[in-house]
Image (tube, rainbow, N blue to C red):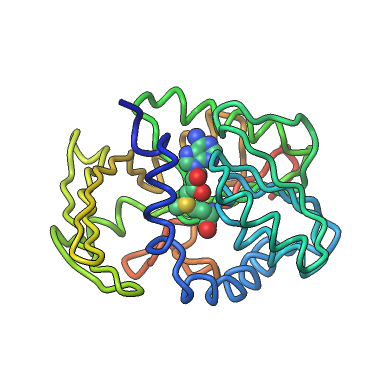
Amino acid sequence: MKAWHEQDNFWAKWAPILFPKQRWENTQEEVINIVSLLKIDPGTSILDLCCGPGRHSLELARRGFSLTGVDRTKSYLEKARKQAEIEGLKVEFIQEDMRSFCKPNTFDVVINLFTSFGYFEDIKDDKRVITNLYRSLKNKGIFLIDIMGKEVLARVFCERNWQEVDNNIVLEERKISKNWSWIDNRWIMIKNGKKEEYKISHRIYSAVELTALLNECGFSSISAYGDLTGEPYDHTAKRLILVAHKGKDKT
Ligand SMILES: C[S@@+](CC[C@H](N)C(=O)[O-])C[C@H]1O[C@@H](n2cnc3c(N)ncnc32)[C@H](O)[C@@H]1O
């Protein structure tokens, strides 16, 4: 049995929950904040690693950035390519695994957004992903990652909750395991009286742990923020955002 994140069925079935209208609508603001936090100009070449259906890739391309989106899920890439074609946007969407994708010295910026990291049981795979994207960056390149930080999770932790998304009832149950290095989620969707259930487990990182991993893979000058506007990573943080630099002469 394949891991949850390697199942096309999982990504297809949960797409309406992961990417509802509201999340697409939030993308513009997220992109404005990313551009401002990284102080980047149109023309900058960006790799959107685990781009999904292309929310950020498309919005960045609309603003004149040069985009490559990489994702494992064919149906998401097809949706993204179709939208790019409708709008006449030049974005390269590549189907590949984040553990193997590497284009040495190619991008000014790599982004990895909305908890698209920590899926693999073997931590060596997480390290492989970071090493590959580090190599894919040009010298002085910047990496931005956005995950649910362990400290934030501990503060807002809720064992069970439910929500209604586009006529689906979604129930979520969470357990912390492996001494706070891992979260085990049970996601249940009820649609037209039919129940679908998936177990979604992944590694959780604190700011210090993820910073250490990025350091180990060669990054320096690593800053942590509590959201994409650059608020501090403190007791009020909403997310864990790390911005890391390749090349030693960054301050
Ligand atoms: C939570 S979604 C985030 C998508 C996108 N970054 C966004 O913010 O809308 C995670 C994405 O990671 C992709 N993914 C999962 N495992 C992957 C892998 N091994 N290699 C590449 N992409 C992967 C999934 O297909 C999915 O699109």
Which is nearer the eye, 55 or 34?
A: 55
For the N terminus, the quadrant is top left
Residue 190, quarter of the rendered image: bottom left
Question: Horizontal and vertical percent for residue 39?
Answer: 73, 64
19 on left or right of 85:
left
Question: Horizontal and vertical percent for residue 56?
Answer: 63, 61
- Let me know if residue 242 appears in the view: no
Query: Looking at the image, which residue is at 53% across and 28% down?
Result: 216
Residue 195, quarter of the rendered image: bottom left
3 on left or right of 57:
left
Q: Residue furthest right?
A: 43
- Let me know if residue 193 appears in the view: yes
128 up-or-down from 17: above or below: above
Query: Looking at the image, which residue is at 31% across and 59% down?
Result: 152
Q: How many marks?
A: 0
Query: Looking at the image, which residue is at 63% across and 38% down?
Result: 95
